[in-house]
Structure formats: structure tokens, C-alpha cells
Amino acid sequence: MVKHNNMVPRTNVMKYWQRFVRVNFNQPAQAKRRQAKRAEKAAKLAPRPAAGNLRPVVKPASLRHNFRLRIGKGFSTAELKQAGIHHRLAPTIGISVDRRRRNKSVEGMQRNVDRLKEYMGKLVYLTNRKRKGKKNVDSRNKLKECKQNTHKNIIPVPRIKYDGARAITAEDKKFMAFSTLRIARAENRMVGPRSKAKAAKAAKTE
């Protein structure tokens, strides 16, 4: 509140404030537009899955995020080999391949192998080529029966279920993680030299 006989401060109320207001009245129209674009893209890809190629399930990097799963770039050659799919055939049947990727855990590899097997079990292969010893199946009739997969990830990403907190046992207290890890690394490193020494010893005895 103004007191005494001082100058009235300028409050700058004469700004053209309407010029600085931003409203999003076009949100419903934009949502409708995006939906139409998705439908158009799906129609172009039909009868193939609307999401494109099948991608693997991987764990994100860092301790903060590695408790969950996300979609990766492509399946490794080891995963494809275990699932019985050639790495050159995979891209032609809608499977992404990343030849630089390496598997670091058995659980992660098995998860993706199961994902590939599930995909191959549901895959409908359409062709007009005549094969030796087999009658040519009319692909048009198959095409009418096929329904397009419109799921975001083709096969949903599974959620990892973790057990709750538990009491620390005496066995847990005795377990030495660092020593166990070092011994396992040493064992892995010494496989070659030990087998070489064993072969040399066997050759001497003969």
C-alpha cells in the first residue's frame, strides 16, 4: 500500500499481454492427425506387423535402470543360431539383427531365444514360389485369413518380478563375492594354458 506523498510507482499494466499467451486448442486435432498417420502407416505395411521388425528385449545400462527391461536394436547372431534362424534369413522375415551385440548372461539370451521361437510359431509365411515336391499354396487365401499385428512391440515386453526384502542368513555373511569373482575369472583365463600343459604332459609320457 502506498504511504506518504511519494511518486506513484509504475506498474507496467499497459503491456499487450495477449501477444504472449500460448494456448493449445489444437490438441484434439493433432491427436486425430497422429492416429490417422498411424493407421495409414499400418495399412502400407499390412499384412506385416504395424510396428515393423521384431526387436529383442534388453536391460538398460547403469545401476539406476538395469532392474527393468526395454526394447533393443537387434538380435545377436548367437541368439538367432540357438533359435535355429540364419542371420541372413532373419531380416527377410521381419527380425532385426545386430551383429555387434554380445550376450553377457544366460538369462538374457534365453529370454530372447524364447521371444524368437514365439514369433516363429505365430509367423505366417506368404509366397507365390513353387517349390520342388510341394504343391503351391495360394497365398491370397492365406492373406484373407491373416490379421495384422498392431501391438507397439509385436510381442509385449515382459516385466521382471523381484522378491521382496529378506533377512540376511549366515550363509550370505560367509559368502565372499569379490574372491569368488576373481577365482572365476582366473579359472576362465587359465583354461587354455592348463589344457596345453596337460597335452604336453600326455605327449611326454607317451
Image (tube, rainbow, N blue to C red):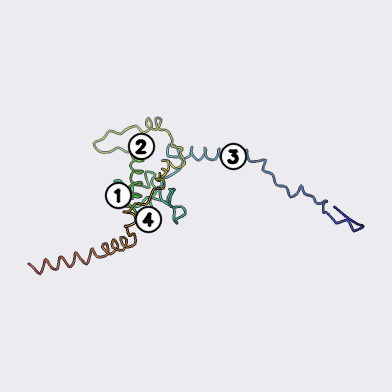
**Label 3 vs label 4: CA separation?**
37 Å
- Answer left or right for 64 relative to 112: right
Tell whether label 3 touches label 2 (CB within 8 Å): no
Crowding near pointer 3: few (<14 within 10 Å), some, many (20+)?
few
Q: Residues within 10 Å of mark 2 (few under 14, many from 20)?
A: few
Q: Position of residue 138 (x, y in %)?
A: 34, 32
Question: Which residue corresponds to mark 1?
Answer: 81
Asked if disc 1 and disc 4 are in contact, CB closer than 8 Å, the reply is: no
Please give the label number shown on residue 101.
4
Residue at x-position 35% and y-position 46%: 111
The CA distance from mark 3 to mark 1 is 42 Å
Q: Report the residue at 28% width, 64% height from top.
A: 186
For the residue marked with disc 2, what is the amino acid? Answer: Lys
**Badge 3 amino acid:** Ala
Among the two numbered marks 1 and 2 on one chain, the one whose residue lies closer to the N terminus: 1
Q: Residue at x 34, y 51 (%)?
A: 169
Q: Which label was assigned to residue 122? A: 2
Residue 121 location, quadrant: top left
Can you give x and y, in whole percent of width and height, for residue 5 in the image? Answer: 92, 57
Q: Residue at x 28, y 61 (%)?
A: 184
Q: Provide the secondary structure element on which disc 2 rests.
A: helix
Label 3 sits on residue: 31
